[in-house]
Image (spheres, rainbow, N blue to C red):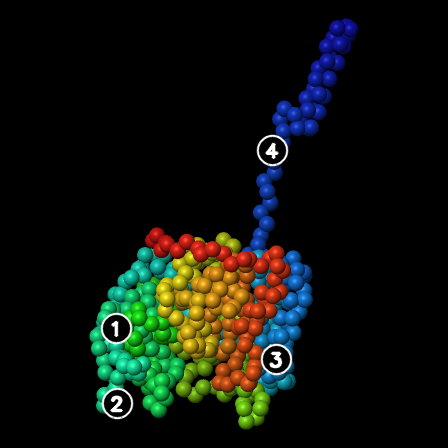
Amino acid sequence: MSALKLKFGSRLLFAAASLALLTACGGAEPAKPAEPAVVAKPFENPAWPAAPVADATSLGFTAEGLAALDARLAKSVADGDVAGLTYILGKGDDIAAFKSFGVQSGDPKTGAPMTNDSLFRIYSMSKPITGVAMMQLYEQGKWQLDDPVTKFVPELANLKVITWKDGKPVMKGGKPVLADPTSPPTMRQLMSHTAGFGYGLCCTDPKNPNFNPVDAAFVKDGVLVSSTLEEMMKKIEGIPLVYDPGTRWSYSVSVDIQGYIVEKLSGQKFSEYLKANIFTPLGMNDTSFFVTDATKARFTDVYHWDKDANALVVNPNRPDRPGFDDPNRLESGGGGLVSSTHDYARFTQMFLNDGAIGANRVLKPETVELMRTNAIGDLKLYSDGTTANPGLPGVGFGMDFAVYDEPSVTGQPYAKGTHYWGGAAGTWFWIDPQNDLFFIGMIQSMGGARPDGMNFRNDSAKLVYEALKPAAAAATAAPAEPAKEPAH
């Protein structure tokens, strides 16, 4: 081989080696950057929430603050405020605390232990779930906020309203004097307890100075112990309104009427609609209108404080209505569901996620915003779903739950836009979008509380927000832009 060929070949080898080196070092043809890895959120696992994170301080809470929350809730059980409780605190896509205390059933001291899997009567915490079903149909264009309710429930077309004078209903011959309502109730009013319907929860005794003949009629006619939604509506159509629609916030049967409307607009049985469109997509497999043989062992008893015995006692089953183990009981959208803390946590997380759990979307973000925006103006609430109140300043009402509209005047630590409700057996929850957190407390107490017992909603909220590290606690935000109704 000639020297020229050797020299030329060496140059080719050198050039090839140089090109390889340049490529490896990011020269002429740099490698394409790798696609960022998609990290699954904890709640995308249907078993979530099963346990809290190992270190809750990573979510913005102090260990001392959470210990104080635990200690106060444990004390409420030791004092006899409740036989047992479960609570869960979620923040930032994960769980800071998930604990149970006391017993779920049987003797308040020695009964079956409360567990994170126990099942509860959530009563009026059923209402926001029914609201989601209604708003899904709203997104489909099947109803509008200012539609009259009679468009979907024509049997209510002849409703009258009782008349009032000096804060008392006008009576004649033992019956209320009736008038025509100024205008028919609208769907917006139905969703916000301003449609004027009664409920039958109080003031049914004529000797009571606050006697309400509408509530008395609800009890006399057995509206809430009807066997079907159709039977319930037949009874409601014969009972007048308490107030002229739109004039007053009045806790009412309106969410049970919503359940009936869901059936009519969807063509499905109410329970079947909820299961297909809310419970299954969100992984709420323990939520239903009744308990089964397989789940009955996890079902909690209801207790009350017996002042004569100076102790908690188990409430007997009510003889006036089917039990929670009866699959044929009324599918009450206003208060009929049984659920677990796990299931309700997935429901509340859906709201923090603006309508979705992972890939399963049940509401549009703009619909969620509409639901948690005050729809009642300056009208005042007289209940929090658990207890009656003289009127709550700074609190409005959206679509089937209350909203902290002006937290600065409430004396409570919630951020603006926090939405919440509760149930007749004491269960309570709130969802705080500003601080990206939710809290759910599950107890079963009805019929009398221990004197000087814990105020579960207020005391737990105070302790939760005290546990937030100062840097993690959101400052009160400027008023948000009013929510627009989502396009259909």
Q: CA distance from mark 1 to mark 4?
A: 66 Å
**In front: label 1 or label 4:** 1
Label 1 packing within 10 angstroms: few (<14), some (14-19), many (20+): many
Check disc 1 and report the residue beneath it.
156
Mark 4 or mark 3, whichever is nearer to me: 3
What is the crowding at mark 2: few (fewer than 14 residues within 10 Å), some, or many (at least 20)?
A: few
Say whether marks 4 and 2 touch (CB < 8 Å).
no
Task: Give the residue type that dot 1 points to.
Answer: Leu
Q: Nearer the viewer, residue 198 or 114?
A: 198
Distance of mark 1 from mark 2, alpha carbons?
A: 24 Å
Residue 81 x %, y %? 57, 82
**Residue 32: image tag:** 4
Q: Nearer the viewer, mark 4 or mark 2?
A: 2
Name which residue lies at 52% across and 81% down. Answer: 445
Name the element at disc 2.
loop
Residue type, mark 2 in image = Gly
Q: In the rendering, which numbered label is found on residue 196?
A: none
Expressed as whole percent of the image width and height from the top left, the position of residue 431 reads 50, 63
Sequence-wise, which precedes: disc 1 or disc 4?
4
Residue at image point 36% right, 72% down? 249
Marks 2 and 3, how far apart in space?
46 Å
Residue 260 position, x and y percent, is 34, 70
**Does dot 1 land on a helix, a strand or a loop?**
helix
At x 58%, y 59%, the residue is 473
Residue named by callout 3 = 77
In this figure, which residue is indicated by the disc labeled 2? 174
Which sits earlier in the primary sequence, circle 4 or circle 2? 4
First reached walking from the N terminus: tag 2 or tag 3:
3
